[in-house]
Amino acid sequence: MAGRKPQRRREFGTTRQLPSGRWQARYWAPDGSRRTAPETFATKTDAQDWLTLTKADIQRNHWVDPDVGAINFEAYASKWVDERGLAATTGELYRRLMRLHILPFFGEVDLDEITPQAVRAWRAERLAATGATTVAKSYRLLKAIMETATDDELIRRNPCRIKGAGSERAKERSIATVEQVDALAEAMGARWRLMVYFAAYGPMRPEEQAGLRRSSVTLEPLAVRIREAVPELNTGRRVEGDTKSAAGVRTIHLPAFLRREVKLHLELFAEKDPDGLLFVGEKGAPFRRTTFGRKWKKARAKVGMPSDFRFYDLRHTGHTLSTRSGATLKDTMVRAGQSSEKAAMIYQHSDDERQQEVAGGIDAKVRAARNKAVGKATPATGA
């Protein structure tokens, strides 16, 4: 009886000439399926070379299934944002950047169709149409989404490779003098003046001030405990949540000259409930960003501050005063509720006692500036 003819070993790939005269390459994928090269070739040698490179990619585990990346970018990106567990304001920002700047260009294409050339063309168009800061934020978001797609092995490499494209080069923010802070507080009116002082000498973020309650404040020592942030979305809805970072939960010791301001505000304007809100509007409702913003613009104009000086810039004033009062970088970071992983910060400490010293230093600086201003306003008398 004749022995059974041995089976021929399956070849990795084959080539064949098409009626057009070009060459087609086919191969066996790691999952056992028969695949066709995504392009045809001018010569048989070109087709065989492509097969050799593809086989090498498979052997080195560098091969990416060309069908895996055929996922609609908008669907993937929307799911990416939903799954991040973002703070309300961050989620709102990401969705706005997506809607206005990213999806109009990439929303209808698949992940594997977004190439470095396409990203460069998109960025160039956006830079011509809108501000560089907005483009940098949009680029960072696109890069983060595509990086996750790379980790998910949906694409081989992130197409966002423009060096420095995600960096923002914001201009140096101006600071207010002590005299200007006092003038802004006066112009804002009795109900809102303490917010100006808290922003400058806290320094507290607007969303942190929105969450302050009577129970957040102590007079001895004069301090404010920041536990949460209550940002206002573009819809006008306020969202209770955590502070911007873990470092945002902190106790801020205030300079002594603010004691009278705090006591007066508690007596006249804060909600009477022991845990009532510290800042409320004339009708007893939580303050609105739009209403407060209009008051701020009028006060800024009255004082003669630059039109781009934001309420948030008062924090920059506070940072500067802290440093000039002898605060270390760590002191200032603790006071402002900022976090950093720099190794140098491990060897610096800022406890409550040091924070009270910083508050005392600010108090002395402000009193000296006020006395100097009063001296200038008093005419000199001859002997």
Image (cartoon, helix red, strand yellow):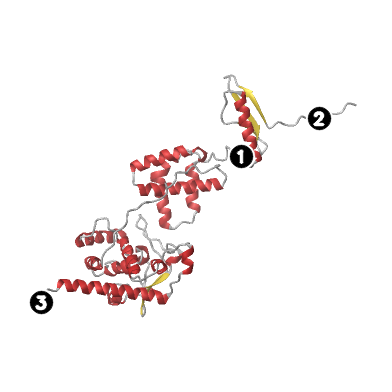
Amino acid at dot 1: Trp
Q: In this view of the protein, can residue 293 be seen by the observer?
A: yes
Instruction: Identify the image quadrant of residue 348.
Output: bottom left
Task: Quote the CA–CA distance across marks 2 and 3.
Answer: 120 Å
Q: Which residue is mark 2?
A: 6
Residue 51 vs 152, above or below: the answer is above
Q: Quadrant of the N terminus?
A: top right
Query: Left or right: where does residue 26 sit relative to residue 286?
Result: right
The three-letter amino acid code for the residue at tag 2 is Pro
Q: Kindly identify which residue carries mark 1.
A: 63
37, above or below 326, in the image: above
User: Left or right of 264: which side holds 159?
Assistant: right
| Neighbourhood count class around disc 2 (C-alpha, 10 Å): few under 14, some 14–19, many 20 upward | few
Q: Are marks 1 and 3 in contact (CB under 8 Å)?
A: no
In the foreground, 178 or 381 = 381
Q: Nearer the viewer, mark 1 or mark 3?
A: 3
Which image quarter holds the C terminus? bottom left
Mark 3: secondary structure: loop
Where's residue 3, x and y in %? 87, 28
Q: Which residue is mark 3?
A: 381
Q: Amino acid at mark 3?
A: Thr
Helix, strand or loop at mark 1? loop
Q: Nearer the viewer, residue 115 or 344?
A: 344
**CA separation in Å, label 2 and label 1:** 31 Å
Point 36% across, 63% down: residue: 207
Ranked by sequence position, the earlier of labels 1 and 3 is: 1
* Res 279 visible: no
Q: Residues within 10 Å of mark 1 (few under 14, many from 20)?
A: some
Upstream in sequence: badge 2 or badge 3: 2
Q: Earlier in the sequence, mark 2 or mark 1?
A: 2
